[in-house]
């Protein structure tokens, strides 16, 4: 398997981008990434999008974006795995280079969610239609059940959940690309409009528009560019039952656990080697479960770990320095690629006020639905 | 790049499968392919589906199918490129093995089109929403414009178009998996209900449900099985402008031409080396343009070539021995994989009454929209 590195990255600001179309925001992020990489051609294009058919009435997104970026006839394809479509696009582009087929590949993630579609219905297509959605459950409801179970089994508190949102809003306040750049308090989270008990609107990631891109290259090509070499040392994915009721324990995100274990194995690393991580905090409870599955803390202790500040910018393992899905925003297909953008900017030392000092190894964890699919990448800076 | 071979294949009958659900038909095809391959595990799963979100309200199809096939936590992902989603899934699974990441990969294509969705709207998401669909054009209209231009520029006749449908219905009559197993005549095609002049309903592929799967393996793994070794010697893709008005010449399918040229180059073969081909005859005119772009005949001569019987079962280059999209059916995401199933069955000598004698090299060409994306694979039997 050939070595693969990230040589460029770019993203739009996330938010309600009503003045720009689906294709506009993709091209904006793509041109930034290509310019950053300094390359004059691409061999292939992978685009992560969850459900552009339902959001904007457009499928065939790979070819569309190749066309509007002006790179046709370059091969292009769209990759979907619900909210980890972006992370999966990164993984498949990684294989394209690793196999020797391509030298330079553009990975994009894009979603336009605020153009008038029924967002709750569109997002629910990530759950099991026959056994969950037709019975009336929605994603806030599914994650609320996970939260209640975690509180019951492990004593996780309402306040601990809120701390995830408070931390991520603080980080978002330092990120010029974030949808929300305002600080919030624990009291505000707990007192906000209830969505599905115990989760309030401030436990929930927003509805967003946005795009993010990275340019990958074989390490040989990357070495010729005079830039810090950010290698992808692991790309790993796994699946689990779609429907929550089919899992042995709903507080365990098996797909995350499996993907993480094989990612550590592939890189020859352990959880304590990771210096910062971007994880899929679609709801506050998700981040708590994920830091446990990634092995940053013992099962059941994620809430306490967060409350103590271990995952804060100055903590032992900064998590979601970008603001995460909660504050940076969550244009679903774009999220996995935006996570990679944040880790690359951090490893390059370009993260401004939210910079983690001397970071050389970072991890991204992206997840679909209530955890039926997950993808984990590990990035390593080599000098 | 590691060598990749097809070690198993299976499909449902194509048609109106009202008694079976989306996940049911996938699992039916997958179990047949796995049983045919004789493997006891999978390393990864790729599923091609065009727009299950619009057809059946279900995205997150990779994980869903891994779950219902009972193979989770195996990594799984859905791949989309409109009507060449299946071919693209095959291509990405090919890279997964070629890179050394996986040894055994299941590729599936599946679509459930007859469950009540607005099929014309759903399929139109493969065209350029902003510049084509919102102006009222549909796919029969787009292909009718290509047909008119081809007739005008090259003297292709109405009768020649009909010959594509007549040939493919004859082949379909020999295929127990085909949706239509009845012969039709040139007069019937021309006299059928007009859809978009000059194309009648018998120039058009039907609305179908169906699934098809192949199991890929590294050649090393494949060689251990006591079966004919069917290698994938090329996997190639390309893109073009989505909107017809943005192309220099609407009778030229540039993405097909580019994908074919690089496929021949990758395999070290030329068009005359190909002994049979499955191509994307979504409308009769498409097959005529495609046999030209694949280099089987000079540009503009595809109609005459077909009328003379060169693409018939007994012709110099049998095309769509399965019945093609026209007669076998066109569950859009499944089509590209079903093409591979047909070529593998032919190269194995298992194609029954439609068997092409002594075939060792076959090609599949799958296409999205009005040709904005295309993927070409070449398969070679080694004894």
Image (cartoon, coloured by chain):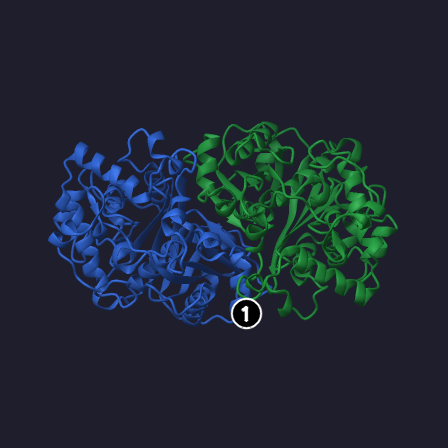
Chain colours: A blue, B green
The picture quadrant where one finds residue A209 is: bottom left
In percent of width and height, residue B305 lies at: 84, 54
Front residue of B135 and A209: B135
> Which residue appears farthest toward the right when viewing the image?
B308
Residue B209: image x %, image y %? 60, 38
- Position of A173 with respect to A33 (left or right) is left
Q: Position of residue A172 (x, y in %)?
A: 23, 62
Residue A135 in view (yes/no):
yes
- Nearest the viewer among B150 and B260 is B150
The residue lying at 41 percent from left, 62 percent from top is A213
Note whether residue A299 is visible: no
Residue displayed at 46% across by 43% down: B57
In this view, B190 is above or below A73 = above
Image-based side of A293 in relation to B229, left or right: left
Question: Label 1 is found on which chain of the structure?
Answer: A
Above or below, comparing residue B329 to residue A15 in the picture? above
Q: Secondary structure at mark 1?
A: loop
Task: Indicate the quadrant where residue A9 lies.
Answer: bottom left
Q: Quadrant of the C terminus of chain A?
A: bottom left
Going by the picture, which residue comes out furthest to the front?
B193
Mark 1 Cα shell of 10 Å, populated few (<14), some (14-19), many (≥20): few
Q: Which residue is mark 1?
A: A70
Left or right placement of residue A379 versus residue A300 in this view: right
Above/below status of A170 relative to B36: below
Q: How many marks?
A: 1
Front one among A298 and A357: A298
* Residue sitting nearer the eye, A297 or A222: A297
Q: Please indicate whether residue B52 sits to the left or right of residue A293 in the image.
A: right
Residue A55 in picture, x, y percent from top left: 44, 55
Q: Identify the image quadrant of residue B139.
A: bottom right
């Amino acid at each position: 398997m050939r070595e693969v590195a990230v040589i460029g990255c770019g993203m739009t600001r996330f938010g309600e981008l009503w003045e720009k179309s689906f294709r506009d925001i993709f091209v904006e992020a793509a041109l930034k990434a290509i310019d950053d990489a300094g390359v004059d051609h691409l061999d292939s294009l992978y685009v992560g999008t969850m459900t552009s058919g339902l959001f904007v009435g457009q499928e065939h997104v790979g070819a569309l974006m190749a066309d509007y970026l002006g790179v046709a006839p370059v091969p292009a394809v769209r990759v979907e795995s619900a909210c980890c479509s972006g992370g999966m696009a990164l993984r498949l582009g990684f294989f394209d280079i690793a196999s020797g087929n391509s030298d330079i590949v553009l990975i994009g993630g894009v979603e336009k969610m605020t153009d008038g579609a029924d967002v709750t219905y569109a997002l629910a297509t990530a759950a099991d239609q026959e056994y969950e959605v037709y019975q009336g459950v929605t994603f806030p409801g599914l994650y609320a059940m996970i939260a209640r179970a975690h509180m019951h089994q492990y004593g996780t508190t309402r306040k601990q959940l809120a701390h995830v949102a408070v931390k991520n809003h603080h980080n978002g306040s330092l990120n010029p690309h974030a949808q929300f750049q305002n600080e919030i308090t624990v009291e505000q989270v707990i007192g906000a409009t209830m969505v599905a008990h115990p989760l309030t609107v401030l436990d929930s990631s927003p509805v967003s528009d946005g795009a993010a891109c990275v340019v990958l290259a074989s390490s040989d090509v990357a070495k010729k560019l005079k830039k810090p070499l950010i290698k992808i040392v692991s790309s790993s994915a796994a699946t689990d039952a779609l429907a929550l009721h089919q899992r042995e324990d709903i507080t365990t995100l098996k797909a995350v656990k499996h993907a993480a274990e094989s990612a550590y194995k592939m890189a020859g690393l352990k959880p304590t080697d990771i210096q910062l991580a971007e994880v899929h905090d679609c709801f506050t409870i998700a981040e708590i479960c994920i830091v446990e599955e990634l092995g940053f803390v013992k099962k059941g202790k994620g809430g306490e770990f967060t409350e103590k500040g271990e995952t804060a910018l100055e903590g032992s393992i900064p998590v979601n320095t970008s603001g995460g899905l909660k504050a940076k925003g969550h244009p679903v297909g774009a999220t996995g690629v935006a996570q990679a953008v944040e880790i690359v900017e951090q490893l390059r030392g370009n993260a401004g006020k939210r910079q983690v000092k001397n970071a050389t190894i970072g991890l991204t964890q992206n997840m679909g639905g209530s955890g039926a699919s997950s993808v984990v990448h590990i990035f390593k800076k080599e000098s």
